[in-house]
Image (tube, rainbow, N blue to C red):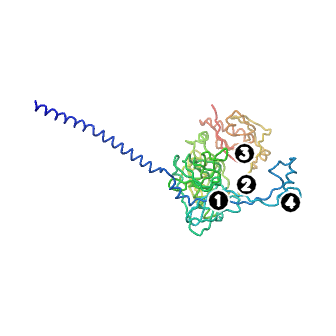
């Protein structure tokens, strides 16, 4: 019995060891998961520091306050104080004269000009004193003074700045100061790498309060406000008046944007600010530094976006590219481009829409020969275009303003929600159409029709239908019949208003 009892505990002991061995993999797995979670938390803590102070201390010496002074000529009379013709007008004239603001003749003329000051921000991009800011910060300024961040090695006094060049289209200006010592500066980063949700820091001179730091995230990308070359980063980092021209930094201390505008009902920050992307700014700054002005590429076409209806009418597989509506004298015409072509690729890059094409052409070197692939009559053609300079074209261009709608008496037909008539010589003069031009004129548009929704109005001239010329009412009717016979769902029209062309695709119905 003693032997039996001595053997039984031993067997029990072996059984427990086997259970532990079976549970060992699970324990090891739990330990591994716990270790990974601890390491992940440590990495997150390392990637997002508790304080932005080290970053702010590193980049702040390159941020500057900008003060501008503008001389405003004296105004005549008490304008802006009381309405013209008000019974109080004479009273304010006498008041101005008594206080030395008039010329003593009782007519209230201010004899002294006034000086107006404004504040903004900027940042140094080179040790020899080049500074980037917004054009609207220094526009029309007679004097520009730069105040540097207080610290060792920084200029103690205000330094005068001269304007090297400006670009109204991107609202960027390049300034230069002369300092006795090398200046602290910051570098541009890649704005395309700034993703929605990334942390960013804005610095500047908000509301004249001096150097200030605010932090937030990238809220959106590729915002467009008003210009053809807009590429704004939207951020909720606080941006207020006076922050204009200041830098937007990523967490590596690189400038990814220039703080330019805010969206606000009251003029204060509500968390919607816009910074011009650094990849746009760097190209502008390089040209301003080299030439004192911008030199953008120019293709020489008028274009519009391709929607689903237009794509169907043209025979494109998808709504993409830029549809050429007109080809005036210029590089595109010399290369053989035609109205009705759809630009599919430019210099090896697929064209998404007109905005993308305008930005890409503008960023291309003047005089460069580029290959352009266009869709034409169901196929594709590759053209070689040598780009001109947009600034030269804009200086020499003279655009004819649209005339008022006209609907004179004429033979007419009602088709696709349009009442159309024959284009007479008298109408050509009234509608700014070139002498001898062909087409049919829209006399009126049914307001319940698709044509009205797509912007067609009385006085518009239809010069092409189905990419064929239209010279008479019967031509237009024939184009409709041909499109239906070919199985098209819509008909492509080339319409001119005030001399300006655009394409419109109208649904043909059942």
Structural distance between the alpha carbons of marks 4 and 3: 52 Å
Structural distance between the alpha carbons of marks 2 and 1: 37 Å
Which is nearer the eye, 91 or 379? 91
- Percent of width and height locating residue 482: 63, 37
What residue does disc 4 label? Answer: 103
* Mark 3, secondary structure of its residue: strand
Rendered image: mark on residue 66: 1
* Mark 2, secondary structure of its residue: loop
Which badge, 2 or 3, is on the more N-terminal residue?
Answer: 2
Callout 2–callout 1 Cβ contact below 8 Å: no
**In which quarter of the view is residue 74 placed?**
bottom right
Q: Is residue 470 visible?
A: yes
- Percent of width and height locating residue 478: 67, 37
What residue does disc 2 label? Answer: 398
* Mark 1, secondary structure of its residue: strand
- Characterize the local packing of mark 3: few (<14), some (14-19) or many (20 or more) Cα atoms within 10 angstroms: many
Residue at image coords 75%, 40%: 422
Structural distance between the alpha carbons of marks 2 and 3: 16 Å
Furthest residue toward front: 2
Left or right: where 240 falls relative to 73: left
Which badge, 3 or 1, is on the more N-terminal residue?
Answer: 1
Structural distance between the alpha carbons of marks 2 and 4: 43 Å
Which is nearer the eye, 152 or 262? 152
- Percent of width and height locating residue 314: 60, 42
Which badge, 4 or 1, is on the more N-terminal residue?
Answer: 1
Furthest residue toward right: 105
Structural distance between the alpha carbons of marks 3 and 1: 46 Å
């Amino acid at each position: 019995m003693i032997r039996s009892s001595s053997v039984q505990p031993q067997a029990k002991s072996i059984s427990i060891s086997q259970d532990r061995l079976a549970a060992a993999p699970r324990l090891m797995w739990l330990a591994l998961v716990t270790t990974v979670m601890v390491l992940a938390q440590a990495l997150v803590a390392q990637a997002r520091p508790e304080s932005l102070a080290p970053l702010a201390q590193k980049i702040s010496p390159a941020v500057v306050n900008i003060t501008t002074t503008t001389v405003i000529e004296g105004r005549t009379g008490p304008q802006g104080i009381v309405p013209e013709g008000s019974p109080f007008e004479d009273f304010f004239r006498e008041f101005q004269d008594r206080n030395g603001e008039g010329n003593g003749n009782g007519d209230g003329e201010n004899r002294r000009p006034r000086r107006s000051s404004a504040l903004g921000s900027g940042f140094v991009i080179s040790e020899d004193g080049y500074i980037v800011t917004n054009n609207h910060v220094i526009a029309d300024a007679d004097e520009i003074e730069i105040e540097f961040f207080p610290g060792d090695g920084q200029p103690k006094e205000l330094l005068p700045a001269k304007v090297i060049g400006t670009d109204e289209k991107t609202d960027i200006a390049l300034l230069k100061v002369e300092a006795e010592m090398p200046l602290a500066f910051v570098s541009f980063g890649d704005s395309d790498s700034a993703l929605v949700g990334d942390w960013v820091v804005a610095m500047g001179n908000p509301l004249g309060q001096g150097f200030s730091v605010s932090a937030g995230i990238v809220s959106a990308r590729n915002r467009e406000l008003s210009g053809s070359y807009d590429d704004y980063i939207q951020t909720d980092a606080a941006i207020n008046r006076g922050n204009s021209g200041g830098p937007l930094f990523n967490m590596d201390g690189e400038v990814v944007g220039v703080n330019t505008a805010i969206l606000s009902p009251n003029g204060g920050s509500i968390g919607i600010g816009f910074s011009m992307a650094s990849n746009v700014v760097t190209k502008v700054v390089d040209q301003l530094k080299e030439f004192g002005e911008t030199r953008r590429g120019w293709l020489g076409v008028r274009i519009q976006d391709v929607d689903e209806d237009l794509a169907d009418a043209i025979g494109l597989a998808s709504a993409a590219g830029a549809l050429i509506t007109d080809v005036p004298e210029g590089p595109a015409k010399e290369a053989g481009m035609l109205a009705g072509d759809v630009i599919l690729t430019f210099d090896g890059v697929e064209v998404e829409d007109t905005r993308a094409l305008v930005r890409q052409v503008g960023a291309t070197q003047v005089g460069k020969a580029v290959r352009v692939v266009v869709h034409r009559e169901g196929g594709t053609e590759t053209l070689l275009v040598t780009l001109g300079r947009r600034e030269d074209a804009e200086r020499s261009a003279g655009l004819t303003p649209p005339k008022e709608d006209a609907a004179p008496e004429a033979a007419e037909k009602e088709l696709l929600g349009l009442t159309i008539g024959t284009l007479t010589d008298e109408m050509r003069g009234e509608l700014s159409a070139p002498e001898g031009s062909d087409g049919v004129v829209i006399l009126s548009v049914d307001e319940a029709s698709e044509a009205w929704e797509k912007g067609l109005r009385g006085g518009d001239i239809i010069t092409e239908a189905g990419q064929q010329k239209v010279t008479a009412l019967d031509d237009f009717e024939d184009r409709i019949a041909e499109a239906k016979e070919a199985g098209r769902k819509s008909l492509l029209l080339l319409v001119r208003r005030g001399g300006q062309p655009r394409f419109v695709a109208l649904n043909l119905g059942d």
